[in-house]
Image: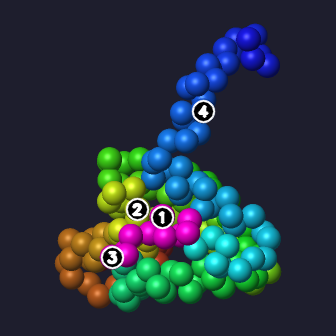
Amino acid sequence: MGLFRHHRTAPVEATATAANEDTFETHFLRYLRTFDGTKRDFSEVEALFNELYDDDFYENKNDTLVTKDQVREAHTRLFEIGSKVTLMHFKQKRPDQIDIKYRIFNAEKNRTIHQLIIIKDKKIIRAEDLDKQEERREEKEIRREEVRMGGYPTRREERMMRTDPYMMDP
């Protein structure tokens, strides 16, 4: 029996196998744990970085392609200033797609990153910023609404605010 009466402890062999399991998730979590707020040289974690990112990795960020080398440079800076990362969620959408959200904080910034990552051979090959994707979806919906409302150049909410609610139609 484990610590709780209702919980049974897994056999030692099964636990050891799970700990040594070579999956994308284990690579990802192992690398994320290195962002513990300790200032360190990137060479200390470079092997973990290379296990996680495919050589052909790219991300389309603000209409600019970001390569693996550029991510390496950004992470080098994050380690230099002692960044800490907290995983908010890790949701497998499909066998090769994972929705991840994490928070990076350090002396310079505190931000949340929400991405859909595409994996191939247990490595990240593509990443898409889901927050930006949601913003674009909202912009498209506003444009569709403008077209449905007769092609007015302003949004429906703006037109509603301009009309006088106390004025009767003639």
Residue depicted at 62% across the width and 61% down the height:
32
- Camera sees residue 158: no
Where 1 sits versus 153, above or below? above
| Residue type at numbered disc 2 | Lys
Residue 143: x and y, percent?
A: 28, 77
Report the mark closest to the observer, 4 or 2.
Answer: 4
Where 64 sits versus 136, above or below? below
Residue depicted at 73% across the width and 73% down the height:
83
Residue highlighted by disc 3: 56
Residue depicted at 39% across the width and 56% down the height:
122
Q: Which dot marks residue 123? A: 2
Mark 2 secondary-structure assignment: strand
**If the image is split into quadrants, where does the C terminus sit?**
bottom left
Report the mark closest to the observer, 3 or 4.
Answer: 4
Taking the magenta stretch, the answer to whether it contains residue 114 is no
Q: Residues within 10 Å of mark 1 (few under 14, many from 20)?
A: many
Determine the CA span between mark 1 and mark 4: 22 Å
Q: Residues within 10 Å of mark 4 (few under 14, many from 20)?
A: few
Q: Which dot marks residue 16? A: 4
**Is label 3 in contact with label 1 (beta carbons under 8 Å)?**
no
Residue highlighted by disc 1: 52
| Residue type at numbered disc 1 | Leu
Q: Residues within 10 Å of mark 2 (few under 14, many from 20)?
A: many
Question: Which residues are drawn in magenta?
Answer: 47-57
**Is label 4 in contact with label 2 (beta carbons under 8 Å)?**
no
| Residue type at numbered disc 3 | Asp
Determine the CA span between mark 3 and mark 2: 10 Å
